């Protein structure tokens, strides 16, 4: 038996030492048990003290209330007795009854009626008795038992004693002139009926000196219980109310066994504590006995239940712990088993992942490590294969772009050839149609320029309306009334076409003639208000509700399966203009339809800094997104990308103000991304967030004009500081510093004035003679000639001079750090900027600033 015990002990000890969770469970149980014992003991003592104090304070209040009520009821009884005492009629009847034969029927009846009348004064009066010095003279009994009279030979000595005590009191020259007697007595006909007595002299209207008779009124003791029983009801058996006389004899108790016993004996026997109050009119005491042992027992029972409940909870927690232990250690055991198999050379064994918690993720990482070991020999081959696939994709993309250009070139050339045939045939109307169709196709096929100007967009819309009007045989007419002041404002290509098309296809459906579309553009304060109106049939209520929801939330189009075109263009417009743009639709079925657009100025459009995040870790992207938007409403995260390649696509599409990018990412790292964006002329600012603080990376970032280099983990203040520095650009001051180009060249050709407005708004963008020639619908050579003729210098030299003039304004206003200025005015290479600055001003930037100071 001893050997078996030792063996079991060694096994348990070995298991305990080899499983770390056993130590945690043991410590947990000891701490929880100790904490429970301490807290339970403390709470138990505190609750006992609280219950005792609360019980005593409550019972004192109850005692005071009962005392007041009993004083009032005793006072009422004494007043009844006083009225009987002063009743002259009763006095005379008693005298007559005593002088005549006691069997006289009339006098007996009159006396009985008088006493009966007084018994009705209170429901608690059980008996009224007339007593003389010779004994009982006459009594009235409420119960009126035939065989039992209240006062009889068995208790007559008590009646004599009450009478004698009263007359002894009358001999004294003191008040009161009544006697409340506490002799306990039960009714002969009802042993459960206990009474007490109030004796008064029967004097009528005579003086106390002539009194020969007394009246003893017996009251039901239950009148005391009616008030004292509330003690028992309110105290949950912890307290009991009772009444004692001046000698300490119990007159009333809920348990009649205690009536007649001494108070001291009762309290000692039951181990009770007592509080009391005096009934002033009769000298008795109202008592409340409090059972502190029962109070303690109740607390012990409550805490015993709590302990049982705690033990049950503890066992449930242990069971729950074992369940958690099993679930938590299951992947650890799986990893352990797999490691043993790998030791034997089995690299194909994988752990079956059954969860998503941290330890299962560890098991998943273990599987990944096994995969990495298996794929180590194939790494170079896979790298080359991916490289070949990437090159093929790039070739396909380049071929598709080339084919698109070839197709557009072929179609436009073909239309040109057809146009000449039409002109030779003398059909100039068809020639105009072909020309407009060719312009529309050329504008649509151009994938390089998605950001255009209102004069280009409206020119395209005018040609589109012209062709639609011809196609529909003059079902509608159109009018474009657009202020020249806004023609040079930037906008997104083809952003008005879906709304105009909607008016034509749906608004004029079923019309034969009389339709009209009006496009107006005018100033609304410092903003542009553009209206598209038609007098068509409007929309039904359901369609209007869908379109209104799409205007508020473009994603609603996916749910409703309608309005996809409008959804796409609203999304593009909101990405470009931000929250400053407003769209409002007013339409009714069978009535006109009005669309109102309010566009911000370019500086207003950029008032909310548009931020993009390029980060391969989803948690880091979400955290940075929340951090940026929490700093200020002025910062709007417009897009996110999980690698450099996707980031480049989105930057070229969205053109954000600021890009926060990681360095190490799949497919294209952060430095390569910045180089690619700079080479494509996009003027976004970059902030690098990296886990590595390397000198070479920082040097490359500075050379590429990166505006901030933050080391992970970043703080709120770091991000706030760099955003505030990047947002410190006052476009209004810049406009005041650089003179209005239109005013400098008032006699220039209208198309050259449009070009000057574009340069003013987009001097930092990648613009060239080819770009303006295409925008203005002329050849590069003609644009170069016309610009030189009207301005006096070549376009290239003018653009350099203007950019340097803006740079000087920025230097003087101190709105940007000096190292950021080259990128802010359109130079991708700072060294080239400094070279051009010296060529135009004849000095370096430092020399220029020193000269001004």
Image (cartoon, helix red, strand yellow):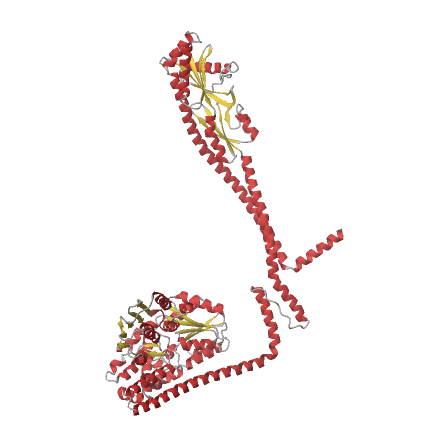
Where residue 832 sits, quadrant-wise, is bottom left
Does 502 sit left or right of 218 as displayed? Answer: left
Foreground of the two, 83 or 744: 83
Q: Quadrant of the C terminus?
A: bottom left
- Whether residue 209 is visible: no
Foreground of the two, 724 or 110: 110
Q: Residue at x 46, y 29 (%)?
A: 226
Residue 323 image point, x, y percent: 60, 57
Does 397 sit left or right of 485 as displayed? Answer: right
Where residue 805 sits, quadrant-wise, is bottom left
Q: Residue at x 73, y 54 (%)?
A: 6
Is residue 715 placed above or below 254 in the rendered structure?
Answer: below
Q: Residue at x 57, y 40 (%)?
A: 301
Residue 337 image point, x, y percent: 65, 66
- Whether residue 737 is visible: yes
Is residue 23 placed above or below 77 in the rendered structure?
Answer: below
Is residue 493 placed above or below 619 in the rendered structure?
Answer: below
**Tally of marks:** 0
Q: Residue furthest top?
A: 100
Residue 326 image point, x, y percent: 62, 59
Does 235 sit left or right of 12 as displayed? Answer: left
């Amino acid at each position: 038996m001893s050997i078996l015990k030792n063996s079991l002990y060694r096994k348990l000890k070995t298991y305990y030492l080899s499983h770390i969770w056993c130590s945690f469970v043991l410590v947990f149980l000891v701490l929880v048990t100790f904490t429970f014992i301490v807290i339970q003991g403390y709470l138990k003592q505190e609750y006992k003290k609280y219950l005792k104090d609360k019980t005593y304070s409550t019972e004192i209040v109850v005692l005071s209330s009962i005392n007041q009520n009993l004083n009032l009821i005793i006072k009422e009884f004494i007043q009844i007795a006083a009225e009987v005492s002063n009743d002259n009629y009763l006095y005379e009847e008693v005298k007559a009854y005593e002088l005549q034969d006691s069997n006289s029927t009339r006098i007996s009846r009159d006396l009985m009626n008088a006493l009966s009348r007084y018994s009705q004064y209170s429901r608690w009066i059980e008996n009224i008795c007339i007593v003389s010095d010779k004994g009982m003279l006459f009594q009235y009994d409420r119960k009126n038992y035939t065989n039992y009279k209240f006062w009889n030979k068995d208790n007559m000595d008590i009646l004599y004693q009450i009478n004698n005590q009263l007359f002894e009191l009358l001999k004294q020259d003191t008040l009161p002139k009544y006697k409340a007697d506490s002799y306990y007595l039960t009714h002969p006909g009802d042993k459960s009926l206990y009474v007490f007595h109030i004796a008064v002299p029967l004097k009528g209207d005579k003086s106390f000196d002539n009194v020969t008779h007394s009246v003893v009124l017996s009251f039901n003791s239950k009148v005391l219980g009616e008030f004292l029983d509330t003690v028992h009801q309110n105290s949950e058996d912890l307290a009991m109310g009772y009444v004692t006389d001046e000698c300490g004899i119990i007159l009333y108790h809920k348990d009649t066994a205690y009536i007649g016993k001494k108070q001291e004996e009762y309290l000692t026997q039951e181990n009770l504590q007592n509080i009391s109050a005096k009934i002033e009119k009769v000298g008795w005491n109202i008592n409340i006995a409090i059972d502190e042992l029962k109070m303690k027992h109740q607390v012990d029972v409550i805490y015993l239940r709590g302990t049982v409940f705690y033990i049950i909870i503890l066992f449930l927690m242990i069971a729950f712990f074992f369940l958690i232990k099993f679930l938590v250690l299951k992947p650890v055991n799986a990893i352990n088993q797999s490691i043993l198999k790998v030791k034997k050379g089995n690299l194909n064994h994988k752990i079956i992942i059954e969860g998503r918690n941290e330890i299962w993720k560890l098991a998943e990482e273990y599987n990944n490590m096994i995969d990495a070991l298996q794929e180590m020999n194939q790494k170079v081959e896979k790298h080359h294969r991916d490289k070949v696939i990437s090159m093929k994709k790039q070739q396909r993309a380049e071929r598709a772009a080339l084919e698109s250009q070839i197709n557009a070139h072929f179609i436009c050339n073909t239309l040109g050839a057809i146009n000449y045939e039409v002109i030779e045939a003398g059909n100039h109307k068809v020639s105009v149609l072909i020309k407009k169709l060719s312009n529309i196709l050329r504008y649509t096929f151009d994938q390089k320029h998605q950001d255009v100007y209102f004069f280009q967009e409206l020119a395209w819309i005018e040609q589109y309306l012209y062709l639609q009007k011809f196609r529909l045989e003059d079902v509608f007419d159109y009018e474009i009334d657009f202020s020249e002041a806004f023609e040079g404002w930037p906008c997104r290509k083809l952003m008005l076409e879906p709304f105009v098309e909607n008016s034509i296809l749906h608004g004029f459906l079923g019309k034969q003639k009389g339709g009209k579309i009006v496009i107006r553009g005018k100033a609304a304060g410092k903003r542009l208000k553009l209206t598209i109106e038609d007098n068509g049939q409007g929309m039904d209520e359901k369609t209007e509700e869908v379109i209104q929801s799409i205007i508020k939330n473009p994603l609603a189009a996916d749910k409703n399966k309608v309005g996809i075109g409008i959804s796409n263009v609203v999304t593009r417009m909101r990405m470009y203009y931000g929250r400053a743009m407003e769209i409002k639709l007013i339409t009714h079925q069978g009535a006109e339809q009005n669309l109102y657009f309010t566009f911000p100025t370019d500086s207003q459009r950029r008032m909310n800094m548009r931020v993009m995040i390029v980060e391969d870790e989803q948690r880091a992207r979400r955290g940075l997104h929340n951090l940026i938007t929490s700093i200020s409403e002025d910062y709007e995260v417009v897009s996110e990308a999980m690698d450099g390649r996707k980031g480049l696509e989105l930057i070229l599409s969205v053109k954000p103000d600021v890009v926060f990018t990681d360095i190490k990412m799949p497919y294209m790292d952060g430095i390569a991304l910045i180089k690619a964006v700079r080479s494509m002329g996009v003027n976004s600012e970059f902030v690098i967030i990296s886990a590595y603080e390397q000198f070479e990376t920082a040097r490359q970032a500075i050379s590429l004009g990166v505006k901030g280099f933050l080391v992970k983990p970043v703080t709120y203040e770091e991000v706030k500081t760099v955003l505030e520095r990047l947002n410190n650009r006052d476009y209004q001051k810049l406009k005041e510093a650089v003179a209005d180009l239109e005013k400098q060249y008032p006699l220039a050709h209208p198309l050259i004035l449009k070009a000057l407005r574009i340069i003013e708004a987009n001097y930092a963008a990648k613009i060239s003679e080819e770009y303006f020639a295409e925008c203005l619908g002329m050849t590069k050579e003609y644009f170069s000639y016309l610009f030189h003729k009207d301005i006096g210098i070549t376009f290239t030299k003018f653009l350099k001079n203007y950019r340097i003039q803006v740079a000087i304004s920025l230097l003087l206003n101190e709105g940007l750090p000096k190292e950021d200025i080259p990128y802010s005015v359109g130079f991708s290479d700072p060294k080239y900027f400094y070279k051009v600055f010296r060529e135009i001003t004849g000095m370096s930037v430092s020399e220029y600033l020193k000269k001004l100071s």
